[in-house]
Amino acid sequence: MGLTAPAEHRTVEYVPESQEGWAVTRLDFLVNWARANSLWPMPFGTACCAIEFMATAASDFDLARFGMERMSFSPRQADVLICAGRVPFKLAPIIRRIWQQMPQPKWCISMGACASTGGMFDNYAVVQGIDTIIPVDVYVPGCPPRPEGLIYGIRMLQEKVKNERAADTRTRDEMEPDPSSQLYIPPSVIDELGEPFGNSVNQTRSGM
Amino acid sequence: MQTGSSAPGGPPVTQKNLPHRGGEANPSARALQNKYASGIKRVEVIWGETVVYIEPGLVHDAIRWLHDDPQQRYDFLSDVTAVEYRDAEVPIEVVWHLRSLPYRRFLRIKAQIPKGAPLEIESVYDIYRAADWLERECYDMFGIRFRGHPDLRRLLMWESYKEGFPLRKDFPLRGRFSRSEQLRQALAQNPEARYSMEELSIADAFAELPEDMRERLNKGERTGE
Amino acid sequence: MSKRTIEVELSTSGLDAQGRPQRVPLVTNDGGTAVALEPPPSLEPDIEGEHMLINIGPQHPATHGVLRLVLELDGETVVRCIPHIGYLHCGFEKIGEYRQYNQIICWTDREDYLNSIGNNVTFALGAERLFGIEITERCKVLRVIACELSRIMSHLVWLGTFCIDIGAFTPFLWAFQRREEIYRLIEKWVGARLTTTATRVGGMAADIPSGWMDGLRQFTRTFPHTLDEIDRVLTRNAIWVGRTVGLGVMTPEEAVNWGLSGPMLRASGVDYDVRKDFPYLDYETYDFEVPVGTNGDVYDRYLVRFEEMRQSVRILQQAADRLPDGPVNIDDPRIILPPKSKATSEMESMIHHFKVVMEGPRPPIGESYVANESPKGEKGYYMVSDGTAKPVRWRIRPPSFVNLAAIPKMVEGHLLSDVIAINASIDIVMGEIDR
């Protein structure tokens, strides 16, 4: 199997000795620490995962200890887009627009099976994974994931944030969708990834 | 308003051990047969629920009568939906679930739309306002047009959805287009569509519109799609 | 004029990658040459005066899901409201035609996800009627417990989010803390907190573990204190009353004609409750009252749901006292799986398990519609069977869908902030509305 399209190659000018002095690494540490511990989430909650997200934010599991209690419903002020719940095709342009409205630096957590891969909704109406529409950093599996699971995903994201480097310009370089298809993954790749489960065009499993 | 104010007998109980067929029918079925004679094609009682099959052209009158008649008073429309069978010979049925709150009765009305006939039936919007969205959804999923509905357009799928009517049996589970094509079409819809002509009761202001605009609208051009 | 295909570049969102608005060039074949046009002037009719069109949603904290309301405002007063739904349409009914009856139970959780276990029960009752089987007494009482716990859970979410919409944040935290207790109980029983899949055709997925009843009794003892606490904070609060009385009034006749059900209908004064009028699971043998309002406004809906929680506690106490011993599943090998210990050791049981799982139990040809009183209203599943293991049609009668259709009627003439309060009082859950 494997991807049919070749990986995109980009060259980045990166000379460690000149870029990564002691001061820069300390600055990186400070900035990343600040960012990781105050990730303001944009809860794009659609379905059942949104309820578990609310439960995670409530007293028993408490997102406030991660600095995430300030839910930013305006994408302009948010850091993390937490897509909690299934995303049907009708909602696809909306989540795309919300993502585009968020300013850099921004990350995305795909919470739950439906947001990550389409989950149990392998049908005409649901996007089979929001990573076809927006770039995702952390996938949290579960249906719905337990609050501990979501917190684990958030911790993973914090690790990712802490390991970023300001000198690496690729990190904040926004990936643009292909202008002809408007998709982040080439259409042929999407079709190939969906093929084992039988999109109707090439229905391979009978009766399911 | 007291539910069951006209209902005979004592307080209702949970129904148990219902027979598959041939149970006690809802008295409204007999009343319908008396009133409409040949228009009522058959009456069945399946698992204790009375199903009345009515000629499609007569359904609106029958439901109007069931709503207005003081002995029937079916004031609550529970559902409007449709059933398409796997067997291609069996016609599509449009189903209405009616409840009479004063009499505490439940009735299912079905109209079979014969194969080859246009998929249309009278709307019951003028009898029950609940039919508004229920019929729109039925149209969206099956393509059944409800004559007399003020604003029949897609409800759950987006208005320019091109793949067809999802709940039809010839519509595959995962849609007709490939996943990437579905995504492309989804992303091409205009989420800013604030209103369409139908929504803003254009009938009031239609006469004041300029001529070319009226022509474009008459040709079916839609705005804000 | 010869036909030519012209490539049109469509902007998906009107914004480029930096978030700046993008003009969409329209290209048309005008007399043989391609001409780029500006988008046509808006074709909407002249909105007289200074009416403003604003758009709430679909992504919005206060719409309780992905609902889009387009409001035509005259200042702050709503002149017209047009709701758009379908942003969570996931093809439940279509997928139900491709799944066996026991498999569909997983989908019933996700549809009204606040009332998961209640939906499981509703579906199981409908399927059992379709199959023509009677469940055991123990199963009935357990299902009543499940339904009432689910009702409390749903009303607590409603209460929490309703309070947030009106401006009070603390009851949300109290409500969710109580919900955690119920989650723990349900997790001990079926293994999942939210999406339970707790019933099977003919019984339940699992019987309650030992000591579970004590946990339930403990909950019923302590929960009314929280209700009293919230009651003290809200019910006679001047701000609360001022913000909710007189809003979104529906008269009884209107409410019935618009198809409202559940607390929406009862707040308007119509005492239709499926548990009392078309009972199931022996609800007529439980001693409880159905709260009915008088004015049909938002305040009455709040009072009705609040009182329903108290009545649910009453039912739970009665059910806990009367739980009989006995099997929880019926004894029909065509429908019920053998116990796991036998299925992994005996050959016949393994084959039995295999057949029931792979082929699925098949009901006789027929159809059934069993309505339950879900926390949102009259919920029912209409199933049509053609004798195979998968239904021909699985229709969900969604109470919030029909309730929400009345929102244009309810918000006309009210202020913008009232729209949020009225929307919250309907208690919608988009998963059920859009399915």
Image (tube, coloured by chain):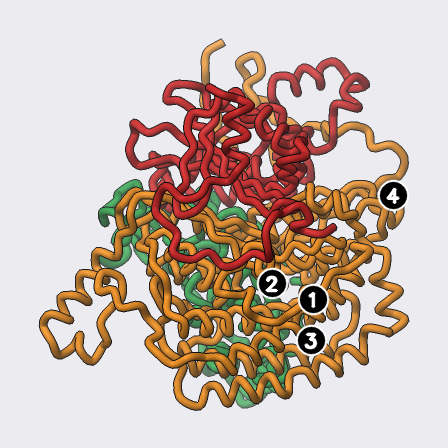
Circle 2 SS class: loop
Does residue B78 appear to the left or right of A12 in the view shown?
Answer: right
Q: Which residue is mark 1?
A: C305
Q: Which chain is green?
A: A
Label ID, residue C207: none
Residue C295 on image: x %, y %: 82, 55
Q: Which chain is red?
A: B
Q: Which residue is mark 3?
A: C172
Q: Which residue is mark 2?
A: C375
Q: CA distance from mark 1 to mark 3?
A: 15 Å
Q: Amino acid at mark 3?
A: Phe
Q: Amino acid at mark 2?
A: Pro
A142 or C243, nearer to the observer: C243
Tags 1 and 3 on a common chain: yes
Q: CA distance from mark 2 to mark 1?
A: 8 Å
First-in-chain label (1 vs 3): 3
Does residue B28 appear to the left or right of C263 in the view shown?
Answer: left
Tags 4 and 3 on a common chain: yes
Residue in view at x 45 percent, y 74 percent: C142
Residue C344 on image: x %, y %: 16, 77
Q: Chain of mark 4?
A: C
Q: Are marks 4 and 1 in contact (CB under 8 Å)?
A: no
First-in-chain label (4 vs 1): 4
Q: Are marks 2 and 3 in contact (CB under 8 Å)?
A: no
Q: Amino acid at mark 4?
A: Asp
Q: Amino acid at mark 1?
A: Arg
Residue extending farthest front: B9
Circle 3 SS class: helix
Q: Which residue is mark 4?
A: C74
Residue extending farthest top: C1
- Whether C328 is drawn above or below C229: the answer is above
